[in-house]
Image (tube, rainbow, N blue to C red):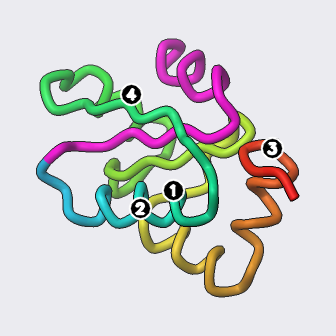
Amino acid sequence: MDRVKDLASKKAAVIFTKSSCCMCHSIKALFYDLGSSPAIHEVDHDANMEWALQRLGCNPSMPAVFVGGKYIGSARDVISLHVDGSLKQKLIEARAIWF
């Protein structure tokens, strides 16, 4: 879990994904559309990383999205934040995007 926390805190926006996950691709595209360049960590061949994400409360485990070092949720949570307008504000506060 320490590795996940370390990776999640190294950049303003961090997304843990699997290459075969269509929702992971959609969330990455949303962040790019908002002007963010998140750190992407693919965990296809790292069962320990996926287990650690689940232990941190990431359920479902993919995508696991962190902004400002804090877990903000998976695809459903991120889309809800985007719809209500708070995702962009979180990205601005974390300095993942500038306006």
Callout 2, which amino acid? Ala
Is the residue marked by circle 1 packed among few (<14), some (14-19), or many (20+) residues within 10 Å?
A: few
Q: Is residue 26 above or below residue 40?
A: below
Classify residue 18 by image quadrant. Answer: top left
CA distance separating discs 2 and 3: 19 Å
Viewer-nearest residue: 85 or 29: 29
Q: Which residues are magenta?
A: 1-19
Which residue occupies 42% across, 66% down? 75
CA distance separating discs 3 and 1: 15 Å
Q: Which residue is mark 2?
A: 29
Is the Cβ of the residue at disc 4 closer than 8 Å to that at disc 1? no
Callout 4, which amino acid? Ala
Whether 15 is among the magenta residues is yes
Q: Which residue is mark 3?
A: 94
- Sequence order check, earlier mark of 3 and 1: 1
Is the Cβ of the residue at disc 1 closer than 8 Å to that at disc 2? yes
Residue 29: percent from left, percent from top: 41, 61
Which residue occupies 74% across, 66% down? 88
Viewer-nearest residue: 40 or 72: 40
Q: Which residue is mark 1?
A: 32
Is the residue marked by circle 4 packed among few (<14), some (14-19), or many (20+) residues within 10 Å?
A: some
- Sequence order check, earlier mark of 2 and 4: 2
Whether 70 is among the magenta residues is no
- Sequence order check, earlier mark of 4 and 1: 1
Callout 1, which amino acid? Tyr
In this picture, residue 74 sits left or right of residue 12: left
Q: Which residue is mark 4?
A: 52
Number of numbered labels in the structure image:
4
